[in-house]
Every structure is written in C-alpha cells, then in structure tokens.
Image (tube, rainbow, N blue to C red):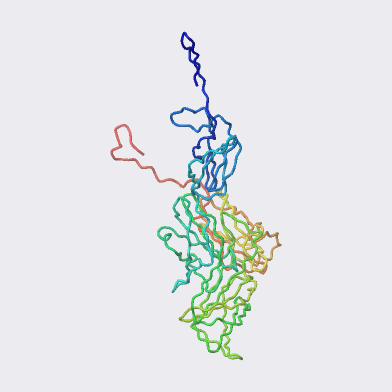
Amino acid sequence: LSLVACNSYGASTEATESAHTENVPDKPDPPSLGSGKTSTSLNIQWELPSGDCRGDPDGCVDDHDLPVTGSELEFEGVAKSYSAVTTTTSRDNLQPFTEYKVRVRFFNSLGASNWSDVDYLITAPDVPSKPDLDQNSCGEPVEGTTHLTLVKGTLVPNANAITEIEVETKQTAEGELTAKVDAFSGTGLDETSLTLTRQGTGFIDYRDYTVSMRARNQLGWSKWSSPITCSRSPETDAEPPQNLEAVPLGPAVEVRWEMPSASTWDDFIVRLEPIPESSGGRRLLQGCTVEAPQPIEVDTGSISCSEVQGGRRLCEFNVTGGTPNTNYTVSVQSRTSQGTSSTPLQLPVVRTPPGPPQEPQCLSLAEITDTSFRLGWLRPRDHGIAIAGFLVTYAGSGAAATVGVGSGGESVPGADSCSAVAGAPASSAGPEGGEVVTALSGLQPGTSYAISITTCNADGDPSPDSAVLNASEVHTYAIPDKPAAPRIDTGEEVTPFSFTV
C-alpha cells in the first residue's frame, strides 16, 4: 500500500506499507523420510508453512500470517492429527521393503489447507519373511525312493534374492534326536516343490514327521516357519502286521506279529527306534557329546510264518545290535512289489537288558611334556551296570604298558585288567557325560605313543570297543635330534673369500 498527500504546490513524498490478506495455509510439500528407517519402521517428517519465504522465486508454503494450529498426516489412508509444533512421527510394525503412501495438510483458524501430493516411502530390505507352510504343502512320495516332496509356496525375499533354503524334518513322536536338515541352493530354488531326502536317510512310510522351513538372502536367515505334520503314505496292497509284540531275549530282541492267512508278502522291515532319554549331566568336550543309541532297521528277507488259530499266521524275528539297557519303540511293516504297508497302530516298547559299557567318548590330549601328558574323555553310558573305571594302554618304542584308572580319573595301582579295576575300592563317579582326566608320567622323551582306553564296569566286563589315539597324534617333547653334517656349497657361491654352509 502507498499514500501521497497533495496541495496546490504539489504532492508529498510517498509513504508505503505492506499488508497481506489472511487465508488457510498453502498446499504443503509431501512428507519425507526423517531420521531413518528399518525393515519394519519409518520415521516421517514434514515442514510447517511460514511467511518468511514469501516472495521466494522457488515457491513457498505460505501460512498467510495466521498461526498454524495443527497438522494431519495420512498414512496408507488413515489420518492422524498432531499439534501445531509437531513435525515428525514414526510408524512401526511395517513390512520389509514395502511402499507406504503418505500425505499431509495443515490447519489454522480459517480452516484446512489442501492435501499435499502423495509420496511413497519404502522400508529397508531385510532377511526373507518367515515362510508360510500349511497342510497343502505336504507333497507326494517320490516313486522308487523313500523321499517326499514339499510344496514350498511363495517366499518373500524382501529386496534381496533368496540364495538358500533349509528344511528340517523330525519324527513327531521321537523329537530332536531324529532331526535332519536338507539344504537347497542354485537352480533348485526355482522349482515349485523341493525333494526331501533327510540327508539321504529317507522317510519311514506312514510315520508322522514335523516339517519346518527357512530361507536365506545376503542379509541372513529368515525365522523358521511354523511346523506342519507330513507323512509318506504310498499306495500299496501290502497288509499291515497286527498284534505286534517284542520281548528281550538275551542280547537280542524277539519280535512277534500276526498276518492274515490270505495275505502275501515278499519280506518285512523291522525297526527299533531308541526313545530319547534325559540329557541331564551331559556336557560338551571340544565340541563333542556322548554318542546316543542309534536306530536299527532290519530287512528280514523271505521268512515263513506258522499257522495259528483264527486263520492267522504268526511271524517271529530276532533283532540284534541294539544298545544295552535302552528303551526302543518296535515297528514292523510288510512289503510287496507294490509297496510297503503301514505300521500297526499300537507299537510296543521293549527295554534291552543291561550289558557291557560304552567306550570312553571324545578322547583328547593336553599338557604334553618330555615325560608326561594328560588325557581327558567324557564318561560314557554304563548300559545298566555301574562303571568301575578304565584301562589305559600306551605303547611306544617297542614297549607297552597298561594302567588302571578309577571312575573319577584316579590311578588304580597294579590293575592291568577290568576285573582288577572292578575289584579295587570304588571311587566317586560323576554323571554320564562328565569329564574324566588322568595323567601318564615316566614316559620317554621324544617318543610317539599309541593310546587305547577301555571302559570297565562293576562286573569286570570291558567295553566292546576302545577309544584310541594313534601314534601320529601323541608325541612327547624332547630336544631336537642330532642334525645331519653341514654341507659346503661348492657351486657358484664359492669365492676366494667366502663359501655357503
């Protein structure tokens, strides 16, 4: 605005003053990324309008000289109001590497501005999303094998290509001891289904398995999927065995079952699955643990089954090789050229009788000197009869000796057999898997020794096998051997004043 006063002599100097009519704020600029983002969150910021930038040739979000009374941010269609001084906010629990729509508007005493243009803010990349398996993911048996397919479904890589998939399977009834992981990479990742082999061991027909999957990209592994239950159930005309029984018979297990008299079979598969026991007291030694009992699977071959009352046939088979003093679940399946039958609904449990102990586990060597070293191992399974101690045999330079060691690692003088170790005063024995340490002294310097350690139980029985360290692994310290004679180089390095030795 300008004002000039006039009289008969002329006009005064011009007086000026600026003025601005009031209005709602101008249309804002879109919100932008604030202090940062993660794979599941966004920090969002916006700039309040102001009259300070009025006249800026690059444009201005003008407040038109009225104080801003608040802001409203719309995030994915949901609006939320904020105070007049707030210019930042965060959104959490979002999806990785995903676009989210945002816009903002302002208020003053006259009303609301227009909405800003929409902008898209993207969360950061992440490891793949947790895979989603359901019962439709369980595939079909692979013909001619004991393998099973798994429909992997749609995997969400979250910006970085998936480079590896792992699938863990374990028998539902048996738990962690049966867990196996199949790994997939390369071109196999493009297939709709994955072929599970349980690291080549295969699946037992009609047995329930818990299946979980995870995926990996360059940022790391996803979470494991929620487990589903799958079983391998091939079509077959084989009749399942009935009235299954199992009883211990000396070191063996006698298994009996019945078959309908009209049924046919080529052979039977008899399995003994160890039932996991508590691992209390067991410990690691150099990444090693006490070896657990292993499953036994036997193909009976062609066997005859005698007729019994009721038009049935009774079959019997003895299974050997089980671990003493161990509970096993026993199952039997019949097999024909068309496939393998299911297992009986009721599976008996049998406990093998006590027997000789397990050999020492996880043998290690430490504190080597010129005349001594220390040996350590994990206390093995006693198989139902208390461990009395151990026999340590060491041989080197044409001489061998055997010494007795108590169950706590103490020396048993004069004991050179398991019966002598068992006859010595008992010592306090720790739990299965506890560490036993003993020392051998009076050895020859600079000598290699072969070590063999046998477990002895209270009945004087030795373990069938021994823990060993080969002579190449055990050598006492000594000064170096006598060197070969020096040799004078008679070649080009010899001069009238020097030579090389």
Quadrant (top left, top right, bottom left, bottom right) of the C terminus? top left
Residue closer to the observer: 328 or 496: 328
Image: 83 above or below 226:
above
Residue closer to the observer: 442 or 313: 313
Image: 299 above or below 363:
below
Q: Residue furthest front?
A: 8
Q: Please tell me which residue is depicted at 46% across the width and 56% down the height of the picture.
A: 164
Position of residue 138 in the picture relative to residue 84 (left or right): left
Quadrant in the rendering for residue 278: bottom right
Q: Position of residue 43 (x, y in %)?
A: 54, 41
Q: Residue furthest left?
A: 492
Residue closer to the observer: 250 or 333: 333
Quadrant in the rendering for residue 176: bottom right
Q: Position of residue 483 (x, y in %)?
A: 43, 45
Residue closer to the observer: 44 or 389: 44
Quadrant in the rendering for residue 426: bottom right
Position of residue 400 in the picture relative to residue 410 (left or right): left
Image: 113 above or below 9:
below
Q: Position of residue 419 (x, y in %)?
A: 65, 67
Q: Position of residue 142 (x, y in %)?
A: 45, 71
Could you tell me how many numbered marks the image carries?
0
Q: Please tell me which residue is depicted at 55% across the width and 72% down the height of the picture.
A: 207
